[in-house]
Image: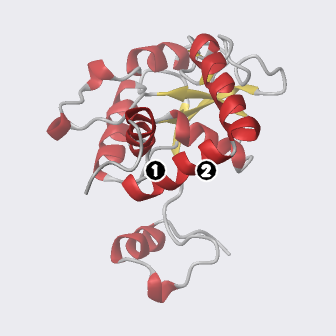
Amino acid sequence: MGAVAGPEIERLVQLLARLPGLGPRSARRAALHLIKKREALMIPLSSAMQVALEKVQVCKTCGNIDTQSPCTVCTDPRRDPSIIVVVADVADLWALERANATQGRYHVLGATLSPLDGVGPQDLTIEALVARAHEAQVHEVILALNATVDGQTTAHYITDLLQDAKVKVTRLAHGVPVGGELDYLDEGTLSAAMRQRTLF
């Protein structure tokens, strides 16, 4: 089958298809929608992307992505400087913020330890985390890492490094999700929930 559009449109489709959650078919639909809504959507989107390209930077303190460094979270005076919430990725930070789950400050590792993928301690911002944990105002480090093998390996590694810091190291509870039915949960989740049971 021959091409149905010029190379410029095909290039747009190919670039959109690289975005997570968009395959070739949905990328074509997105490209067509952008072209049809050129004035209302494509031009403002193009402008917003150019501004983001010029102004977005990584926060030197926590690793968040913002248009300033230190970022909006780090400079918020309402934040509790005694708590550092450790996350693997900026997406995790944003998820916790959407849930309004904490008033602490954050530390983004950049990934989790994964020997199979060649990700070692030197690839993460663990040294900076240890330095922050030794600051006088820090009393608790919350490890908000995924309940995967890599996430738990990273959590144990960090816990060992923080033994001489005068901080309490905690982690997110693992178990039955709110609204979850036991029959639909996997065995690992059920056993974790049973081990971490609390008083009623």
State left or right for residue 76 relative to residue 160: right
State left or right for residue 94 relative to residue 154: right
Q: Position of residue 197 (x, y in %)?
A: 53, 70
Q: Nearer the viewer, residue 190 or 28?
A: 28
38 lies above or below 188 = above
- Front label number (2 vs 1): 2
Marks 2/1 in contact by CB < 8 Å: the verdict is no
**Residue flagged by tag 1: what amino acid is it?**
Ala
**Element type at mark 1:** helix
Furthest residue in direction bottom, as rendered: 183
Please give the label number shown on residue 33. 2
Q: Position of residue 11 (x, y in %)?
A: 39, 35
Q: Position of residue 9 (x, y in %)?
A: 45, 38
Mark 2 Cα shell of 10 Å, populated few (<14), some (14-19), many (≥20):
few
**Residue flagged by tag 2: what amino acid is it?**
His
Please name the colour scheme applied to the rendered image.
Answer: secondary structure
Q: Residue at x 57, y 20 (%)?
A: 62
C-alpha gap between disc 2 and disc 1: 10 Å
4 lies above or below 155 = below
Q: Nearer the viewer, residue 38 or 56?
A: 38
Label whose residue precedes the other's in the sequence (2 or 1) = 1
Which residue lies under the disc numbered 1? 27
Q: Position of residue 97 (x, y in %)?
A: 69, 41
Q: Quadrant of the N terminus?
A: bottom left
Residue 60, by quadrant, is top right
